[in-house]
Amino acid sequence: MNKLTMLGWVSIALIAVGSVLGLAVLPADALQGEVQRLLYVHVPVAWVMMLAFFVVFLMSILYLVQRQLKWDLLAVSAAELGVLAAVLTLILGTLWGRPTWGIWWAWDPRVTTTALLVPIYTGYLVVRSMTEDPDRRARWAAVIGLIAFVQVPIVYLSVFWWRSLHQPPSSPQSMWSAYGLVMLLGFVAYTLAFAYLWLRRYRLAATELELELSGPEEG
Amino acid sequence: MNDHWLFIGAGYGITWASLCWYLLRLRRRERMAAAASGRGGEGARAGGPG
């Protein structure tokens, strides 16, 4: 079993353990009741979303400095996962919001700024299909990846800057230690799942680029 | 309180289903890329979970 495969299985095992603890072992929250169990997946997935977009930002800088296509491939692989995590964060948030806030959707600063990440990074992915030149594509994407990241700290700080329906960021200090530990386990598990999918997606992107550069086969 | 479990089930279910969908999509693309580069089947073997 190679290291990447092992990483995949470890992340699956940790997600399973965290889910059992969060769904069946820990008691329900005194105020919110059972629905608080969504914390153990909503917060880690939101963390992965921010991590993925930070990776896009970092890889974009590296591309612009070194002009090596591998950084672009690592960036697009993270962007794709970031969009998936952003959509999941919004779905999980709305499923948590309905029983606690009484509404499916609120134009709350945290929710709205998070929702904006989806068209921004989808745009990043769409722009890439507008040119067939790998270097130009990488350059355009890197500039967008750099500018788009401005939105990420706005998402994080939105609950401090504006009067918000959304609670401040959850941390192990803001809750009972057992809840905090299971949430931390979720952070580790979903981060490893991200790393696994990201590296596998990068490997695919490298193969696809190789095919693109070699051109269509003759005959 | 019981309807809370519907929201919890939907949340966890959608998350896991999405991860499985992404993994399967990745695996299909890996197989296509491997076939196109003349290394048919290697992508499938290189897989890992899923």
Image: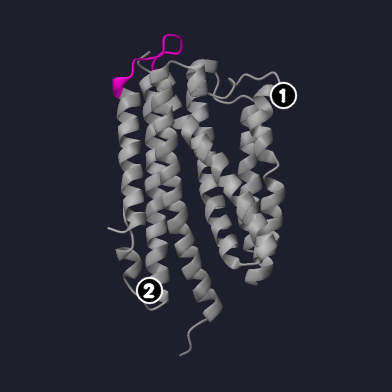
Height in image: A56 above or below B13?
A: below
Height in image: A43 above or below A33?
A: below
Callout 1: helix, strand or loop?
helix
Left or right side of A146 for A99: left
Q: Quadrant of the N terminus of chain A?
A: bottom left
Callout 2: helix, strand or loop?
helix
Structural crowding at the residue carrying mark 2, measured as other residues with C-alpha within 10 Å and reported as few (<14), some (14–19) or many (≥20):
some
Q: Are marks 2 and 1 on the same chain?
A: no
Q: Give coordinates of residue A63: x percent, y percent.
A: 65, 61
**What is the magenta range?**
A24-35
Task: Specify the amino acid type for callout 1.
Answer: Trp
User: What secondary structure is the stretch in magenta mostly built from?
Assistant: loop
Q: Is residue A26 magenta?
A: yes
Question: Is residue A168 shown to the viewer in this render?
Answer: yes
Report in which chain the residue with disc 1 lies: A
Q: Give coordinates of residue A35: x percent, y percent.
A: 42, 19
Spot the residue most to the top.
A30
